Amino acid sequence: MPPPRVLVVEDSPDDEALTRRAFRRSSPDVEVVVQGDGPAALGWLGRLASEGQEPLPAFVLLDINLPQMSGQEVLRLIRGDPRLRCLPVIMFSSSNEEADLRESYQGGASSYIRKPVDFDAFMAAVAQVGAYWLNLNLMARSPG
């Protein structure tokens, strides 16, 4: 069985580096795939779902503020694709706005986590997200 994979949709090089570092520390066997914008992430997921050769990622860690297409729109498109509908999508954003939180859950987010600003808290948050979604969560396969 191949190692689990996580898709991180993040346009900030600093946050990308911190996220990769956090996964290396907490879940060294996980393959972290980073896409810097929504269209790239959707294209990558669509290819995986169409080919069916490689498993989908265990979960998607999705920033809200992305170039070209918001994370909210990416979430809606994932939830609208029957092949991806059951894929866990965790919104990982610096936004603490109630409207973003509400829109995320109404759009089908599996979870919403505010990105900590503190280095140690950021590392701990990513480790906890990985521990839950990689080790405890049972994932249903999407029909289609």
Image (cartoon, rainbow, N blue to C red):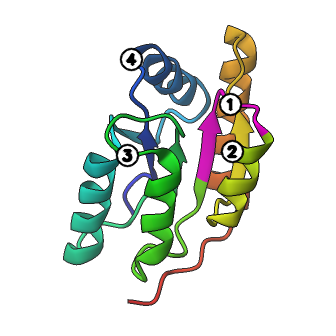
Q: Give residue 95's mark.
A: 1
Q: CA distance from mark 4 to mark 1?
A: 18 Å
Question: Marks 2 and 1: CB-CB under 8 Å?
Answer: yes
Q: Residue furthest bottom?
A: 143
Q: Is residue 94 magenta?
A: yes
Residue at x 68%, y 55% (from the top left corner): 103
Picture residue at 42% right of the left edge, 40% below the top: 9
Q: Nearer the viewer, mark 4 or mark 1?
A: 1
Specify the amino acid type for callout 4: Pro
Dot 2 or dot 3: first in sequence order is 3
User: Which secondary structure lies at badge 1?
Assistant: loop
Alpha-carbon span between mark 2 and mark 1: 7 Å
The span from disc 2 to disc 3 (Cα, nearest Å) is 15 Å
Q: Which residue is mark 2?
A: 100
Q: Which residues are magenta?
A: 90-97
Disc with the residue nearer the chain's start (4 vs 3): 4
Q: Are marks 2 and 3 in contact (CB under 8 Å)?
A: no
